[in-house]
Amino acid sequence: MRRSFNLFLIILLLTGCVQQSILDDIQMVTIIGYDLPDEDKEDGLIKGIAVAPQYLADGKIENNVFVETAKLSKEIRSQYNSKSPKPIVSGKLEVAMFSREIAETEGVTGLVDTLHRDPSIGSRVFLGIANGDTEELLSTNYGNVDTGTYFQDILKHNSKHGMLPETNLHSFLYSYYSEGSDPFLPILDRDGDKVKITGIGLLDGGKMVSELDADNLFTFKILQEKFSSNDSFSVNLDQDKYAAIYNIASKRKIEYNSREANKIKIRGSILGVIKEYSGKALTPEALKEIEETMEKDIEKRGTKMIQSFQELGIDPISLGNAVRSKTRGEFDRKKWIDEYKNMDISFDMNVKITESGIIE
């Protein structure tokens, strides 16, 4: 028994030594970015930025930034390795960023496909659009933290607990290849020494054709998916009165009848708690006013949003998939978009607020 325990202990120690040796001998890239090169560079090139954290003995983290230019994204990795004292690997990649310029002109399809084809990259890698200079965004020091993990934490937190729908490699590919939906990606920008989500880029295929600002993320998420959020939503009742709603749980239901093929009704429902109320007393009448004001505000934003989607011929809220599930026979994407542009799509909200929190 004692001999078996000693053997187990030796194996455990050797395993730890081997793992440490491997980690010391490689550069683990956690975030990458792509941008178009400077104007004086040859046409057809792409600039790649990779960040690999180095954990120092004193507990500090040093983010090593590699910047190279090539015609293919795979060539860029070879160039990274030519200037690195250690092999660069992507098995720990957490985030991939694309510049606004690439998203609007070249499109992100080819770059996303390269990520998808790399067996070392997982399907849960977050994707995003950089508003501004991608190299500057990824090269900035955001404190004693791995830059890739920092970006991942922002996107993961806002997807799970905030107003951002899930936007990783898996969800992007699903929307891109689905005949009944179109992809979208979060837009990120620097805010001093931090990073913030400033909106959502809407894509037609792989190109960004429009965007939603941060104020419309809540309404977009209601239209897009069922969710629960710890974020708060402000309701402006008049010039001197407002209410803040939190602990929000939202559901959506899409109603479609093939006998009325030109109509779709989206029903959204919200359950929330009052966090703050600036009025004198939170009476049943005041509660009703808050609910109705919130309903009208979300309905107005959502209806305007849907009309914009129809004009652009994009379907980021996956209405086509809902129609497809209730349609017999083969679903034709082109025919659907032609019909979708002229459909009568209505959006109704039901808000239920419970009394709690702070009353000023």
Image (cartoon, rainbow, N blue to C red):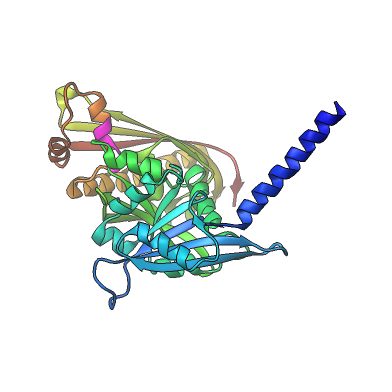
Q: Is residue 104 left or right of residue 227?
A: left
* Residue 194 horizontal/vertical position (percent): 53, 64
At a point 48% along the width and 42% down the height, the residue shown is: 286
Where's the N terminus, which quadrant? top right
Which of the 4 image quarters holds residue 45? bottom left
Residue with the most extreme bottom position? 40
Q: How many marks?
A: 0
Closest to the observer, 155 or 149: 149
Closest to the observer, 170 or 282: 170
Is any atom of residue 240 visible in this view? no
Check residue 145 for magenta coloring.
no
* Residue 128 horizontal/vertical position (percent): 40, 54
Q: Is residue 73 left or right of residue 331?
A: right
Task: Give the answer, above or below, for where 314 lies relative to 44.
Answer: above
State which region is magenta. 316-321
Which of the 4 image quarters holds residue 209? bottom left
* Residue 249 horizontal/vertical position (percent): 48, 36
Check residue 317 for magenta coloring.
yes
Task: Give the answer, above or below, for where 196 lies relative to 156.
Answer: below
Which of the 4 image quarters holds residue 262? top left
Is any atom of residue 127 visible in this view? yes
At a point 52% along the width and 58% down the height, the residue shown is: 87
Closest to the observer, 189 or 41: 41
